[in-house]
Image (tube, rainbow, N blue to C red):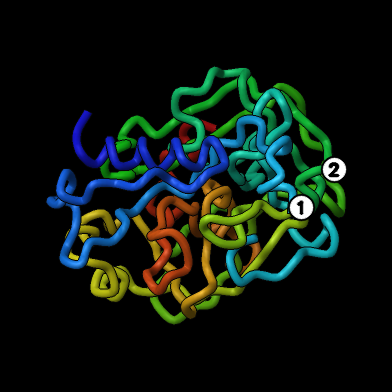
Amino acid sequence: MNKLSLVFAILFLGAAIGQDAPEINFDDVETLYESPPIQPPMGVYFEPDDLDDNPDFMSRVVGGTSATSAAQFPYQASLRTAGNAHFCGATIIASRTVLSAAHCTVGRGQTAVRVVVGTHLRLSGGIMHTSSRIVNNPRYNANTIAFDVSIVQTATTFTFNNNVRSLGLGAAHVGGGVAAVVSGWGQTSHPGSLPNALQWARLTVLTNADCRNRHTANNRPMVFDQKICTFTRVGQGICMGDSGGPLVIGSNVIGIPSWVIPCARGFPDVYDRVSSHRAWIISVM
């Protein structure tokens, strides 16, 4: 296991058991950091084993606003374990297909994921569908979080209505200074809680050059051309549990939450750019 994978494993293990990540000896991972050391980027993934039995997690997109109905974000889906615990978001893009992040689904069995649609509440409501097929982008790299895209197809068809509908796949390259909306059930702070009500925020898209300049020298190479970034202010952004969900402009999904410096601490959030992966997504749907 290389050093970056070791750091990710330590951080994800801390999240998986609902506790702060154990202290890292930065002398062991100094090649990943500038001085002073900061946390490396990590996929905004939250392992929810026994989540709802942990009082620390019974209490949002950080700095977000609560959705008031499922009809407000009818394209939002929740990826769940067999025990109905949310671990990542997803976007409905067809009658049996949702778009998510590869770091959410890699290593999971074809029928191990449940897809819940038609609710803005994490702990109640909605319709659950069992997955029948998971396809991760074959170029996904767990060390660099490149090509962090997957699709999940369900065994049963979604019933489209006011609470359930699909989005188009953004085809145009989105530049800087554009407003987009992100939504998810991720932590409201890090460390922090997963909310019951879906959270959303209006964020500003950055150019990739601006995004790289705002990150440390060690993390800039991970802002690939196939990524897209947002930043509006300190205290607002995506966090653990928001992975895979929708970054939206109008009726199109343009980004898939991929990695952050957790969370909302002044560094841009990084997504996979849907327009860069659109041809691959369509080819495997």
Q: CA distance from mark 1 to mark 2?
A: 9 Å
Badge 1 or badge 2: first in the primary sequence: 2
Picture coordinates of residue 75 (x, y %)? 71, 51
Residue at (86%, 42%) from the top-left corner?
125
Dot 2 alpha-carbon crowd within 10 angstroms: few under 14, some 14 to 19, many 20 or more: few
What residue would you read off at disc 2? 124
Specify the quadrant that holds the N terminus. top left
> Could you tell me if residue 146 is visible in this image?
no
> Could you tell me if residue 65 is visible in this image?
yes
Residue at (64%, 54%) from the top-left corner?
193
Q: Judge whether 104 appears above or below 245 on screen.
A: above
Residue at (49%, 53%) from the top-left corner?
257
Q: Judge whether 206 appears above or below 41 on screen.
A: below
Quarter of the image where one finds residue 209: bottom left
Nearer to us in this view, 258 or 44: 44
In screen coordinates, is 58 left or right of 152?
right
Nearer to us in this view, 277 or 59: 59
Amino acid on which disc 1 is placed: Asn
What residue would you read off at disc 1? 196
Picture coordinates of residue 169 (x, y %)? 54, 52
Amino acid on which disc 2 is placed: Ser
Dot 1 alpha-carbon crowd within 10 angstroms: few under 14, some 14 to 19, many 20 or more: some
The answer to whether marks 1 and 2 mark residues whose Cβ atoms lie closer than 8 Å is: yes
